[in-house]
Image: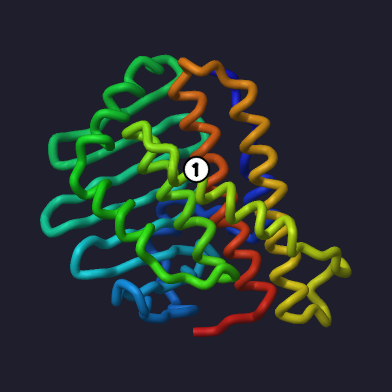
Amino acid sequence: MRVIRTIAAPLMAAGVMIASPAQAGAAQEQLLQQHTDSATGAAIRIHRQATGALSLEVDSPVVGIRKAVTGGRSVTRLRHGRDEVTIEFDGVNLTVVDRAGAVVVTPEHADRIEAARRKLAGSPVVAKAAQLIGRLDLPANSPARLPLLTTRAILLSASGDRSGAVELNAWIQTARSGARVVRVGLQGMTATDCWNEYAKEAIAAYMEYEECMKNEQWWDLLGQTSCALVYDMRAIGAMSWWISCVGLRG
């Protein structure tokens, strides 16, 4: 597996504050944005902790989805009734946890990636989460759309389904066609300026993701997964920057 470059710098540039696990546990969340999806009835919430870490939540009677980047680690939790699946990634190591236990994939134990893939592919919670995201009626210019599309692509890819990746690519192409160059600095930027800068970061991150994938061998599932998870962290970071730019408050 090719060594993936350091991700802390681009995440901080995108607006994600790096907090220690102890700080993260003590942080109080502030609700920044909430709305009810018209297609599914799911509540979509964006929170910020006192540390600056951002979380995105999709809550429906069918399945709950929560994503956060804290302490340089991305955590995605999927919940359905008593069943829960957690996907954690720190830029190097991947951990997948369900009721049956945990699979920890490291560069020294890259062979475990197949067990992690099977755990995701065989999980009803994962399938329901991917289905829910696919049904959401989020506007094309919603900052929550990109990290959720990225999540869906990762979940579906565990079963060899590339439709999520195709949809993600289509969003990027649409953003690319609409992006405009704006002045540097938050002072005086309009909501449109903020969106254009957000789109530029999303596009740049996606181009790095594509380059990362080109450098991986077709059989190296861990390398490909790492590329996708690094991009997932960048997507959350871009959303955090956008929220800071437009100045949303709870």
Colouring: rainbow
Using residue 190 as the reference point, say whether residue 172 is left or right of it.
left
Disc 1, SS: helix
Provide residue 233's location: percent of width, then percent of height.
Answer: 53, 48
Using residue 192 as the reference point, say whether residue 154 is left or right of it.
left
* Disc 1 target residue: 165
Provide residue 158's location: percent of width, then percent of height.
Answer: 35, 34
Q: State how many labels appear.
A: 1
Crowd rating for badge 1 (residues with CA inside 10 Å; few <14, some 14–19, many 20+): some
Provide residue 192's location: percent of width, then percent of height.
Answer: 73, 77
What is the three-letter code of the residue carrying label 1? Ala
Which residue is depicted at the point 43% across and 64% down? Answer: 56
Residue 45 quadrant: bottom left
Which residue is depicted at the point 40% across and 49% down? Answer: 152
Which residue is depicted at the point 38% across and 64% down? Answer: 26
Provide residue 127's location: percent of width, then percent of height.
Answer: 26, 47
Q: Is residue 90 above or below residue 59?
A: above
Residue 216 quadrant: top right
Q: Residue furthest right?
A: 183
Using residue 47 as the reference point, say whether residue 119 is left or right of it.
left
Which residue is depicted at the point 62% across and 37% down? Answer: 209
Q: Is residue 173 above or below residue 156?
A: below
Q: Is residue 112 above or below residue 206?
A: above
